[in-house]
Amino acid sequence: MIPTGTLPELILTLLVAAAIAPLMGQYVANVYSGGSSFWEPVVGRIEAAAYWVMGVDPGRPMTWKEYLRALLITDGLAMAFVFVLVQVQAGLPGNALGAPNMSWDLALHTATAFGTNTDYQHYVPETQISQFASLYGLELLMFTSPATGLCVVAALARGFTRRDGRIGNYYVDFVRTLTRILVPLTVLGAIAFVLLGVPETLTQAVHILPLTGGKEVVPLGPVASWDSIEFLGTNGGGFYAANAASPFQNPSAATNFVAILLMTALTFGTPIAFARLVRRPGEALPLVATVVTLFLVGLVLFLAFEGSNPFLPATVNQSSGYLVGAESRFSITESALFQFTSVYTNTGATNMALGSLTPMAQSVLLFGMFMQSTPGGVGTGFGTLLINVVLAVFMGGLMVGRSPEYLGKKIGMAQVKWAAGAILSHPFAILIPTAVAMTVPGVLTSAIGGYTPHGFTVLLYEFTSEAANNGSGMGPINDGTMFFNVVGALVMLVGRYVPLAAMVAIAGSLSTQAPHRPGSGTLKTRSLTFWFFLTAFIVVVTGLLFLPVLALGPFSQIVGGL
Amino acid sequence: MAGSSADRPREGADRPPSALRASLPLLLVLGLLAGFVYPTGITGFAHLVTPGTASGSLLKDPNGTPYGLAGLGENITNPAMFWLRPSLIDDQAFESNGTGAGDEVPPGPTDPALVNETDAALASYCNETVGAISIDCFANLSVPIDLLTPSASGLDPDLTPAAALVQIPRVAFYSGLSEEFLRDLVNERTVTPALGLFGPAYVNIVELDVALLPYLPAGTGYG
């Protein structure tokens, strides 16, 4: 049982998060509709200079193919740069702890992980990456990947408002996302973390002489500034291997609280931003209600399952919750709220040892990554939600004999094809690699030491986390191998760019349509019925796709032990 | 700026510039901002407003020797002192050459190793305690879970107050200090929730043991 004394804090945290998200939504909508900012004179000049340097005409909107091409090339270049950087880091400055060059496969995995907003770490941050590569390489990707995600929200909205086949200029969206959303908010977050005692220094390590003898080298660095973009951009890669469980990255209940707010700010704000961008603010209601419903149901289940573990002997007092793999400076409720939020926003930072969670709590996390949209990562989570909306509107329209329309645009073959492709790419990217890893001789044994239900859960979690661009890792798994690096990189690329391409394509295909006046045959989306239908649609589709694998993993753990 | 050589990789001047032409300078500038300007700027700010915590809150003994960092645990096994949670990583935590993050994790929730390791921790706790106060430890005690099981980071220096208090009979027996004195010491060092709302109550055991040290008979501390 979760200690009831911790519930007021839980509710307060959720309320504060709920108060911030609509403000963020308004703000983001203002940025993408070309509104002026509180520091317009400065930021306007910076942007003008950026467009001049890039040779971009900000007044020229792109077709969806141009938009997607610009997006892919920007992301690709950034990842290629990091791929090279971490392979030559040993010879570069800023490597006081002597991190060796990464092998090509580990470099591939690392660059892909950060470039796709996954941030799954097969390397050990303390020993296998230099400060220089961390800052100039990884931190660069931690800014570009959430920016890419947010741009897609703007593009999708334009699909509904425009009729000239143009969905905006990618470079303008990208630059404005950085100058007006990510950079100011990240700086605010970093200042908060600094004030709350998170280390922030250019010293790379300190030496200490512990009282129990011996000596230790403790890596340090600009942790507060890393933390801020890690959480705000739903990146989730840790400065330390222990990530948000580390006493340096997340030293207190206060920093834990700020981290939760940073993770929820943009992710819960985007549906509101979208609805304002399509000039129908009321349409945010069914979307937000769906996301919040699924989020809260998941949270309540997760908390309930982390209350205690009946498998332990009665001599062990679990009155403060099931604290195995959780930190004592957080109550179990704080740990669980952070961990749940991190996985459901596809941030993937961990402040608990996920392998120690009770099997049903593990299932709750897996289900969130199967859904990817409650609320999911910055931008892409909302995009996935919209893909579900497209399918739900289409199917709902067929069921009740209404013409499938959404926000004044007809949902036809083109949109449904792209949406179905995006939805199906997810089980494809998870189940096939899991099945391959289970059957290729040697891989299974070296990774998890042979089949056990818990081992299967760990394996499934690895590919699910990569496909959902989540990045949280469940142990124990030996995944620093060529197989997991190469396959993992492919899984992350499919998990990121197939849905992204589908979202941009849907925006493009809608942007050529003239808007429709709603008739008597139009399916009403701003309604209680649609909220209920969309929620049920997401749960049922996800369940149909993934319940069988949950049965092989966590469910068998409960029945069969181990 | 835009070269006019055919179609690849650059296009004509009134056409949209090629993606490479636009993306490269964008990433160069952004790399400098993300890698240098942002962390350096925040570091400068941090060293102005919170110089102590910004450099990791180094803990120093009276001679000025740094013995730890706030929030960092130690492996204390002396029965005359308070113990921390069992850790899966040793003092060389930060120097070990792991092959993949997540190699050293607590056992799974239904893994027999979890019960075995918990029992072992309970036994080592009880053996010391039984020696001290001769009660039937296994039957009568309800030992808080955090004293027996590892944390997520493996560095956790903290315990719930209950897990600190339950060690008092043993510490009193081996140190010769009174239980009342020790209880006061623990209570004094217990961090209570901020505003009565944020965070659990907990005790930093590393700092508790540092406070305990001067009261121990000479030569019985740490070791």
Image (cartoon, rainbow, N blue to C red):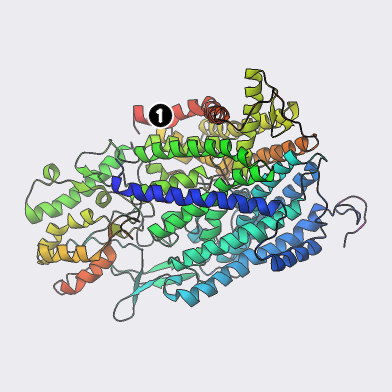
Decide which of A436, A246 is in the foreground and name it.
A246
Please state, as top left, top right, bottom left or bottom right, where the N terminus of chain A lies in the image. Answer: top left
**Residue A508 sits above or below residue A213 on the image:** above
Q: Is residue A218 magenta?
A: no
Is A7 left, or right, of B127 in this rendering?
Answer: right
Relative image position of residue B149 (x, y in whole percent): 29, 49
What residue is drawn where x is 35% and y is 30%? A558
Amino acid type of disc 1? Phe
The residue sitting at 20% across, 63% down in the picture is: B186
Which element carries disc 1, helix, strand or loop? helix
Q: Does residue A121 show up? A: no
User: Circle 1: is it few (<14), some (14-19), or many (20+) Cα within 10 Å?
Assistant: many
Query: Where is mark 1, residue-wise?
Result: A555
Of the pair A46 and B135, the residue shown nearer to us? A46
Toward the left, the furthest residue is B134
| Left or right of A518 in this view: A545 | left
Residue A230 visible in image: yes
Is residue A27 shown above or below A312? below
* Magenta residues, start to end: B1-8
Quadrant of the rendered image containing residue B202: bottom left
Position of residue B68 measured from the top left corner of the image (x, y, whole percent): 35, 69
Left or right relative to A530: residue A246 = left
Queried whether the magenta region covers residue B4, the answer comes back as yes
- Residue A172: % across, % down: 75, 55
Identity of the residue furthest to the front in this view: A520
Q: Tell which subunit mark 1 falls on.
A: A
